[in-house]
């Protein structure tokens, strides 16, 4: 369970819909982008299977 301010959730919900994602998918995408930007997520190994970045 995640507790968010109602206005924050509504903004996140709209953003997710604009990018054809679920709210959960949008949160995952945001966290993934933040981890990459902070240098805390290693680049995928060549030939590794996994999700591709979405829009």
Image (tube, rainbow, N blue to C red):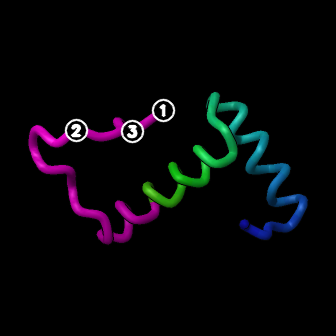
Q: Under tag 3, what secondary structure?
A: loop
Q: Under tag 1, what secondary structure?
A: loop
Main secondary structure type of the part rendered in magenta: loop
Q: Quadrant of the N terminus?
A: bottom right
Q: Where is residue 24 in the image (x, y as percent from the top left)?
A: 64, 48
Q: Name the residue under label 2.
A: 49
Mark 3 burial class by Cα count in 10 Å: few <14, some 14-19, many 20+: few
- Does residue 37 sit above or below 29 in this rendering? below
Q: Is residue 35 magenta?
A: yes
Q: Where is residue 13 in the image (x, y as percent from the top left)?
A: 77, 44
Judge depth for marks 2 and 1 and give the one in front: 2
Horizontal arrangement in the rendering, residue 52 relative to residue 24 (left or right): left
Judge depth for marks 2 and 3 and give the one in front: 2
Q: Position of residue 14 (x, y in %)?
A: 78, 40
Q: Does the magenta stretch include residue 46?
A: yes
Which residue does the image show at 23% across and 62% down from the upper left?
42
Q: Say how many tags the image has.
A: 3
Q: Distance between the residues labelled 1 and 3?
A: 7 Å
Horizontal arrangement in the rendering, residue 3 relative to residue 53 (left or right): right
Residue 47 quadrant? top left
Q: What number is the disc on residue 55?
A: 1
Mark 2 burial class by Cα count in 10 Å: few <14, some 14-19, many 20+: few
Q: Mark 3 points at which residue?
A: 53
- Does residue 47 sit above or below 38 in this rendering? above
Q: Which of marks 2 and 1 is nearer the N terminus?
A: 2
Residue 16 quadrant? top right
Q: Distance between the residues labelled 2 and 3?
A: 12 Å
State the residue in front, 50 or 19: 50
Q: What number is the disc on residue 26?
A: none
State the residue in front, 52 or 1: 1
What residue range appears in magenta? 34-55
């Amino acid at each position: 369970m995640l507790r968010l301010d109602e206005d924050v959730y509504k903004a996140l919900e709209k953003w997710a819909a604009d990018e054809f994602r679920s709210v959960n998918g949008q949160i995952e995408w945001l966290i993934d982008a933040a981890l990459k930007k902070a240098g805390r997520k290693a680049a995928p190994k060549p030939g590794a299977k996994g999700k591709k970045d979405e829009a």
